[in-house]
Amino acid sequence: MFARYTTLRGDRDKIEAAIEYVDGEVRAAVEATPGNVGFGVAADPASGFLIGASYWDSRESMTTAESALAESRERAADMAGAEMSIERYEVVAGFRHSIPARGALLRLSRFLVEPARVDEAITNMREGSVPRVKGADGLCSFQLLFNRDTGHGMVVSSWENLTAADAFWPVAEQLRARATEHAGVQFLDVENCTVIRTSVRLD
């Protein structure tokens, strides 16, 4: 499975209209596109931050759909008065305990590893991090995303609330330190936002 994350950072006074558009018209267009396996929307309206995350059954499906959906992305950016960035990943691990409700917390933790060590990092995080995360109280879902070409990656976790996410954070810090020590993973920024809706189908 592959994922394209489109992030808008714009005018907080305009973001609500953009959220409605992305979760409505854009969602319908994405989910009707061949190869799509779900679409997630999350936002932090107070800071003018909006994410539309589309998931695909193959790299080819994701690439083919990109130009077809470009107009929708541009319109959303215009509505929000936003700068747009696009990230493309392979989903190398993922599971779901429950579908996060509207208002649940989505935590995005970005990282970087040397491209030559990507496979090493994937193995380390699959074997060391995923089993520890699975038992976390209040966890709804977890994904490990990698771009093998650039070495960029992201841990995407959804939680019932901020309290649950923060309660697990000391364990997360231990897992991050382990990945850094054993696979050279350099962790970058962590962002919290609110789940609007997701239809992503995780195995």
Image: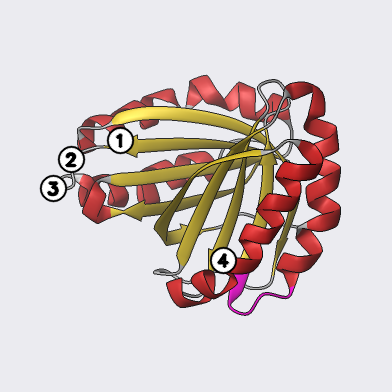
Whether the residues at callouts 3 and 2 have beta carbons within 8 Å, the answer is yes
Residue type at mark 3?
Asp
Residue type at mark 2?
Asp
Counting from the top left corner in percent of width and height, residue 18 is at: 27, 44
Residue carrying label 3: 13
Residue type at mark 1?
Ala
What is the distance, in whole Å, between disc 3 and disc 2 at their CAs? 5 Å
* Eye-nearest disc, 1 or 3: 3
First in residue order: circle 1 vs circle 3: 3
First in residue order: circle 3 vs circle 4: 3
Q: Is residue 139 magenta?
A: yes
Residue carrying label 2: 11
Counting from the top left corner in percent of width and height, residue 64 is at: 62, 22
Residue 169, numbered label: 4
Q: Is residue 85 magenta?
A: no
* Eye-nearest disc, 4 or 1: 4
Residue carrying label 1: 76
